[in-house]
Image (cartoon, helix red, strand yellow):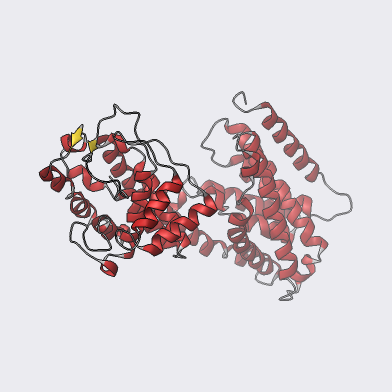
Amino acid sequence: MGSVPAWARVYVACVVAGALVCLTPVPDVHVPWWAVGLLAALYAGCEQLARCRLLGRHAPRAMGTFFPVLLAGAFLLPPTAAALVAVPGALLARVEQRPRGPRRVWRAARLGLAVWAASRVHWALAGRDAVDRPDFPDALVPVGAAVLVFCAVLTALDGGILALAERVPVRNAWRGLFLRSLAPVAVHGLAGLMMAVLWRSHYGPVAALLVLLPMHVSCWVFEQYHRERAAHQATIRALVQAVDIKDGYTRGHSERVGQASMMIACELGMDDARVEVLRFAGILHDVGKLGVPTRLLRKNGSLTPEERRVIELHPEYGHEMVRGIGFLGEARSAILHHHERLDGSGYPYGLAGTQIPECARVVAVADAFDAMTSTRCYRRARPVADALEELERCAGTQFDPEMVEALVRALGRHGWRPEVTADGDDQRGNVPPQSEPLRAEAGS
């Protein structure tokens, strides 16, 4: 554990000590050891199945694929015995990062404590009697309380290890952990309740095991979704890196336009799927620069009219490049039309007003905002307030006023931290004619 900070080691040791106390047998409490052994073997077997490529080798472990087994143990067994169910599987689980031994011990201790606390609450609320009957909806009250406690204990422990071992700032270590885990753990809690009820019914433990089949299928589907999403992200990352290599003076511009586009979309109340599409559109809006000669992108001086017309082809090049990428959806039209102007004087097709797709109007504002607030080879970055003032001045002619207002509101709530996209005045890049009046830049 040499690479683990000292305070983190102390923290893990305290958690392990607490788990050992929870595993201490309590006198005069009957424990069905055959049930403990069966559930522990089932949980350990499920953890080993995670090593199989077909059944989920790369499944997201944070989702707690096999939590129903642990929660069923919390609903069926005394707290000490329920905590024991998690230990063998956690100690045998696959661990990717080093040091593997301490990580296994940590996993076993945190799960043991969480299951013990959940079982303690469930039994205190007479949950065992509700499972034996079963008596619905009364059985849901102790189950709901147990799920909340289970989730809260995991959140508290995970936040502590993030702060001490991963050095995440304390104010951020616990942020969002509980809410992100509550929904999936609640679903697993209901599955655990179904297992417990079937276990105590005349159908017996064999019927209870059938609950795991649809749970595992759903987790497998969820895993496939994450694999597909990872492939999408890799595709976008490769395209952006190619643009950054070719047009290095705007490095980081694409990611910031994606962020600003997402902020505008959220402020407009778009659903999560459209927000994601707008982020893709912002990130890839300049991908067509791959089709523009490098000498024009890096020209140190004013562009001739012919050279400017060549550069103005980049939206069409970009659209052609991404036309076959189905998951981008309406982001493709944003890439094509993000240089259109509301008054019809933009390019490539001179669309006006609502003829311009909504997503393109969002990206146009985000693109111009980041261009003005980033240092370029031909001028220094402008303050955010000045950039917003310029956007508001050009609203109605160059930009959609609704999108400009949404960006203003979003920045008022969240602020903006622009990054320098050029190293200095000697950085090469295409410089607009110096005689051109200062106006809101329609990107780069």
* Residue at (34, 50) in percent of width and height: 367
Q: Is residue 243 visible?
A: yes
Q: Residue at x 30, y 48 (%)?
A: 443
From the viewer's side, name the closer residue of 182 and 410: 410
Of residues 430 and 281, the one nearer the viewer is: 430
Q: To which quarter of the image does residue 211 belong? A: bottom right
Question: Is residue 197 shown above or below 106?
Answer: below
Q: Nearer the viewer, residue 415 or 118?
A: 415
Residue lying farthest to the top in this orientation? 2
Q: Which residue lies furthest to the bottom in this view?
A: 136
Q: Residue 328, percent across and down?
A: 31, 57
Relative to 223, is 175 on the left or the right?
right
Quarter of the figure with the C terminus: top left
Identify which residue is drawn at 76% across, 71% down.
Answer: 130
Residue 401 spot, x, y in % from top left:
38, 63
How many marks are shown on the rendered structure? 0
Q: Image check: 269 left or right of 361? A: right
User: Is any part of residue 224 visible from this angle?
Assistant: no
Horizontal placement of 306 versus 202: left or right?
left
Q: In this view, does 8 lie to the left or right of 381?
A: right
Residue 381 appears at what percent x and percent y? 39, 39
Q: Residue furthest right?
A: 28
Task: Classify residue 297 by image quadrant.
Answer: top left
- Percent coordinates x, y for residue 277 in the rendering: 37, 58
Q: Quadrant of the N terminus?
A: top right
Q: Residue lying farthest left? A: 306
Tell me if residue 61 comes above or below residue 422 in the rendering.
below
Q: Which of 364 and 100 is in front in this view?
A: 364
Q: Is residue 235 above or below residue 347?
A: above
